[in-house]
Amino acid sequence: MDDTTPEDLALRKAVRLDRYAEILAHVVHFGTDRTEEVVQRFGLSLER
């Protein structure tokens, strides 16, 4: 059973994979405790 909602699918498509990898690399570098700050610097929110 797939519980994926249309909203979940739209969010997954909001960021290209290469961009996601770049953001994730920054999160890993600066630490997960600063994730929200790092994501905001890329003009995104945690939800996005």
Image (cartoon, rainbow, N blue to C red):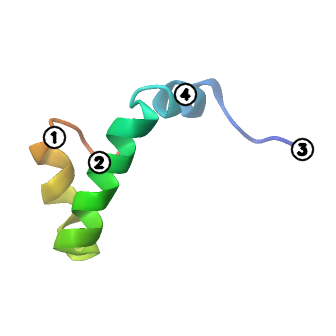
Which residue type does callout 2 highlight?
Answer: Glu
**Circles 4 and 2 in contact, beta carbons < 8 Å:** no
Mark sitting earlier along the chain (3/1): 3
Mark 3: which secondary structure? loop
Name the mark on residue 1: 3
Say which residue label 2 marks.
Answer: 22
Which residue type does callout 4 highlight?
Answer: Glu
Quadrant occupied by the C terminus = top left
* Most foreground residue, 41 or 20: 20
Mark sitting earlier along the chain (4/2): 4
Q: Is residue 23 left or right of residue 38?
A: right
Q: CA distance from mark 3 to mark 4?
A: 17 Å
Name the mark on residue 7: 4
* Most foreground residue, 26 or 34: 26
Residue found at x 49% / y 26%: 13
Mark sitting earlier along the chain (2/1): 2
Residue found at x 59% / y 29%: 9
Mark sitting earlier along the chain (3/4): 3
Mark 4: which secondary structure? helix
